[in-house]
Amino acid sequence: MASQYVGIDLHRRRSVIVRQTPDGEVLETVRINNDPVALACQIEKAGPDPEVVLEATYGWSWAVDLLQACGAQVHLAHPLGVKGFAYRRVKNDVRDASDLADLLRMGRLPEAWIAPPDVRELRELVRYRGKLVALRSGLKAQVHAVLAKEGVAVPLTELFGPAGLELIEQAHLSPVYRLRATSLLELIDAFDGEVEMLHRVIAARLATDCGYHAIQAIGGVGQTLAAVLVAEIGDVTRLANPARLCSWAGLTPRHRESDTVVRRGHITKQGSKLVRWAAIEAVHSLPAGTKLRADRDRIAANRGKGIGKVAAAKSCSRWSRTGCVTGASAACPNPTSRQCEWARGTPRTRARLSAWPPAFGVVA
């Protein structure tokens, strides 16, 4: 018996499931409450090894894990690839589920990668840390605003170091503004503790990841950016070459072509925002004497700073893929191998292990 095709239009509370034969005949359409038992019972009706598709929408991970545990071959539809559904004259949950099943059945489904649970957990930690850092930055901006409202000058580059905290303590603030400043500083201290805790947890999870250690040899990439790149890229071998990684990160220019007219624009900015941010952030503070900095400055002199940074970010992304592939290859079975020794070693150690890597960001 041929496998059935199942399209699921997943929502937060309820979902619509459409089962089809390989010829496209609709066998059943049902609406269920989002409950693991109810979903498992419906998939059981599809027989052994059904082909199931759902969109990569809000809260998809629990459904994918359950379907895979039930023996289904799960496919995740890319939201941009099925965006055309929104322009139909008739749009409802049944049509959406049916169209997903049809696309899968005809081999036309634009698929997204299903990250395994361990990668999703690492992403959760990295993204949560990033969210806390962003919230902490907002709190620090409020402290600056309080001082500005009271006319307190800040002749320091770092307001939240020892000298800056002493300045805030000695500033003449009215009771209301003093209350707010004190509250903000206490919140910042709390966020500092949570961010530091997450940093330790992430570092512990990546301690044996050779790719994580390898890409820190790239100029401008430290522990935080390396963790972002490793977590967001995941299984780097799913991207056939470095150019695919740059395209996936949204660092490649738009291309519009019709007949003999070709228009290329700014970078697409489609894909992983965090990978794009990490690559751009890395090239902001490149050490002197690195190839990335030389390339960035040369291109910036000819075509502008923005284009120079993006070009250097693309190189950083390509090298990140190379580092992850090399670090995760069979030649690096454990964190004491030559690759990881090079990435974590002193200059003398790197000279001894000069066979790897080939000029990772260093001008020869």
Image (tube, helix red, strand yellow):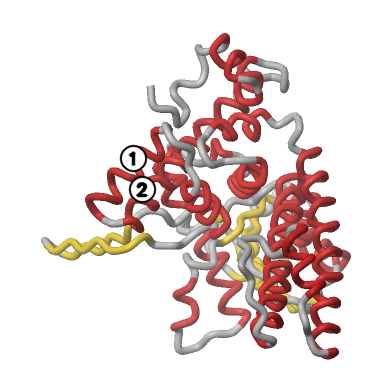
The residue under the point 43% across, 33% down is 290
In-image side of 362 versus 5 (left or right): left
Residue 295 numbered tag: 1
Name the one closer to the observer, 161 or 152: 152
Counting from the top left corner in percent of width and height, residue 347 is at 58, 19
Name the one closer to the observer, 244 or 190: 190
The residue under the point 54% across, 57% down is 272
Residue type at mark 2?
Ala
Q: Earlier in the sequence, mark 1 or mark 2?
A: 1
Q: Are marks 1 and 2 in contact (CB under 8 Å)?
A: yes
Query: Is 248 placed above or below 84 here?
Result: above
* Residue identifier under label 2: 311
Describe the element under mark 1 as helix, strand or loop: helix
**Where is the C terminus found, in terms of image quarters?**
top left
In-image side of 331 versus 209 (left or right): left
Query: Is 158 placed above or below 322 here?
Result: below
Counting from the top left corner in percent of width and height, residue 12 is at 75, 76
The residue under the point 85% across, 76% down is 182
Q: Nearer the viewer, mark 1 or mark 2?
A: 1
Label 2 crowd (10 A; few <14 / some 14-19 / many >=20): many
Q: How much space separates mark 1 and mark 2, taking CA atoms?
A: 8 Å
